[in-house]
Each structure stands twice: as structure tokens, then as C-alpha cells.
Amino acid sequence: MDAMNIADLFSEALYIVVIIVSIIIVPSLIVGLIVSTFQAATQINEQTLSFLPRLLVTLLMMIFAGPYLVNKVVEFANTIYMNIPILIG
């Protein structure tokens, strides 16, 4: 097991985590920013007004991007399983 192989696996895993998190969280962040700006402009201080749109956007992104994200994780897991003989010996 070489340190370079471990570094490659770790960097690929970190890349997949960043992709998954950014696809789900960034749209929610943008919607939250838009709703917060609207609340500040109209002086509406309702907590659920910012929570519900973010929740809906997060759920929609999980529904639409879910198959792609699961495919990326399964592909990475297959890569790890196929490379076990290389990593061990």
C-alpha cells in the first residue's frame, strides 16, 4: 500500500463529498439569501418564511440530482473494491 494510492483515494473521496454538498447546499444558500434580503426590505420577521423555501429547494435538489449523486458514490465504491488487490499488494 503506497502513500500515493492513499492520497489519490482521499482526494477523490474529498472531491465527491464537495460535489455532493455543493449540489445540495448551494441552491439552498442562494434561496435563503434571496428570502432574507426580501425580509430585510419588507421588515417581515417570520422565521418560517426563510425555512420553508430552503427546505423545498433542498428536497427538490435531492430529488433531481439524487440519481447522479448516488451514481457517483457507487462508482467510487466500485473503484475502491476493484482496487483492493492493488492497494493490498
Image (spheres, rainbow, N blue to C red):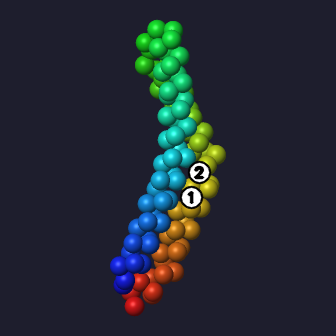
Image spot of residue 1 (x, y percent): 36, 84
Whether residue 52 is visible to the viewer of this picture, yes or no, is no
**Placement of 72 over or under 37, stated as above or below:** below
Quarter where residue 34 is shown: top right
**Residue type at the position of mark 1:** Val
* Residue 51 % position (x, y): 47, 26
What residue is shown with label 2?
66
- At label 2, the amino acid type is Gly
What residue is rendered at 49% in x and 15% in y?
39
**Looking at this rendering, what residue extends furthest in the right direction?**
64
The answer to whether residue 42 is above or below residue 69 is above
Location of residue 56 in the rendering, given as x and y in whole percent from the top left corner: 56, 32
Residue ranking furthest to the top: 43
Name the one closer to the observer, 5 or 56. Answer: 5
Q: Are marks 1 and 2 in contact (CB under 8 Å)?
A: yes
Measured from the top left, where is residue 66 in percent x and y? 59, 51
Q: CA distance from mark 1 to mark 2?
A: 6 Å
Taking the spot 42% from the left edge, 78% from the top edge, the residue there is 5
On the image, which quarter does residue 72 sit in?
Answer: bottom right
For the question of whether residue 15 can be seen, the reply is yes
Image quarter of the C terminus: bottom left
Q: Looking at the rendered structure, which numbered label has been put on residue 70?
A: 1
**Residue shown at 43% from the left, 60% from the top:** 14
Q: Could you tell me which secondary element the residue under label 1 belongs to?
A: helix
Quarter of the view holding residue 13:
bottom left
At 37% across and 83% down in the image, what residue appears?
Answer: 2
Mark 2 closeness class: few <14, some 14–19, many ≥20 residues within 10 Å: some
Does residue 69 sit above or below 11 in this rendering? above
